[in-house]
Amino acid sequence: MKQKVILIFDIGKTNKKCFLFDENFVQVKNIYKQIAEVIDDDGFASDDLMAIEKWMFSVYEDLKTTAEYEITAINFSTYGATMVHLDEAGKPCTPMYNYLKIIPEDILQLFTQKYGDLKTWSQQTASPVLGMLNAGLQLFWLKYKKPTLFKKIHHSVFLPQYLSYRFNSQLITEFTGVGCHTGMWDFKKNDFHLWMYAEDLTKLLPPMHSTNEVFTMPGTEIKCGTGIHDSSAALIPYLRKAGKPFMLLSTGTWSICLNPFNHELLLDEDLEEDCL
């Protein structure tokens, strides 16, 4: 009899990983893969989205046909701040830009001219000014630096949701992607920031969904999750099990301290210390 397993793809900057868990969430198999970067249209190194997809589907097909395992569910976690921009046919129409890429100073100056002091914007959106790490600014940069390319974009999705979409055909936006240092979300108003509406960018983001939602992969009975920002993925097991407040130290390519029980808005000094 085949062992029923949950398949998780965890796509990091350094390693692309696949994990199989049994029904008691015990890991039964893992696969690690490093994939060479490619060059974007500006000559900047970035992850090779097509190669990542090819590897994922290869792993999935191999596991699906094995006599050892039966995949019952699949989900995805990836690093944040990375978006995939899709054309009318639902295909990527721009490179997948590296979050380490620098946003030109003139774009930041234009943003400041239109929407005021970046410190205020940072406070309202809980987003230190971090260039392309602010995914909202990537959309602004595309609109004003690459208008021909920007006009091709019908939807922009965060990387975890793009990978989920490739398996379940559902285009969605998920809360933790929008909320993490994107500069998109006004935490006091609990809505997209006014600048997102003023630039007509909210229309590019598919409908919002929760990580609790599950889809079924077409032609199968396999349950498929929405995908999730990796830092949020690290928090969820503890949020569901912990009986009292805690702080989580998460290490990897980035090492961060997560405190989900602090509901205060960030101060200037917090933002200067790269608090999110």
Image (cartoon, grey):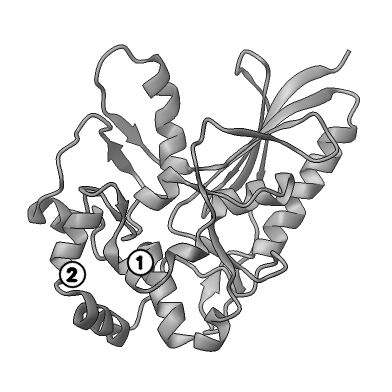
| Residue lying at 85% horizontally and 17% vertically, measured from the top left | 2
Which of the two residues, 203 or 274, is positioned nearer the viewer here?
Answer: 203
- C-alpha span from label 2 to label 1: 17 Å
Name which residue type carries label 1: Tyr
For residue 118, the mark is: 2
For residue 197, the mark is: 1
Which of the two residues, 231 or 84, is positioned nearer the viewer here?
Answer: 84
Asked where in the image residue 53 lies, by quadrant, the reply is bottom right
Discs 2/1, front: 1
Residue 182 against residue 9 in the figure, above or below: below
Dot 2 surroundings within 10 Å: few (below 14), some, or many (20 or more)? Answer: some
Q: Is residue 186 left or right of residue 135?
A: left
Look at the image and tell me whether residue 111 can be seen: yes
| Residue lying at 20% horizontally and 64% vertically, measured from the top left | 121
Name which residue type carries label 2: Leu
| Residue lying at 20% horizontally and 56% vertically, measured from the top left | 124
Image location (x, y in percent) of residue 63:
82, 34
Image location (x, y in percent) of residue 52:
68, 56
Residue 199 against residue 52 in the figure, above or below: below
**Mark 2 or mark 1: whose residue is earlier in sequence:** 2
Image location (x, y in percent) of residue 188:
20, 48
Residue 182 against residue 149 in the figure, above or below: above
Image location (x, y in percent) of residue 140:
39, 75
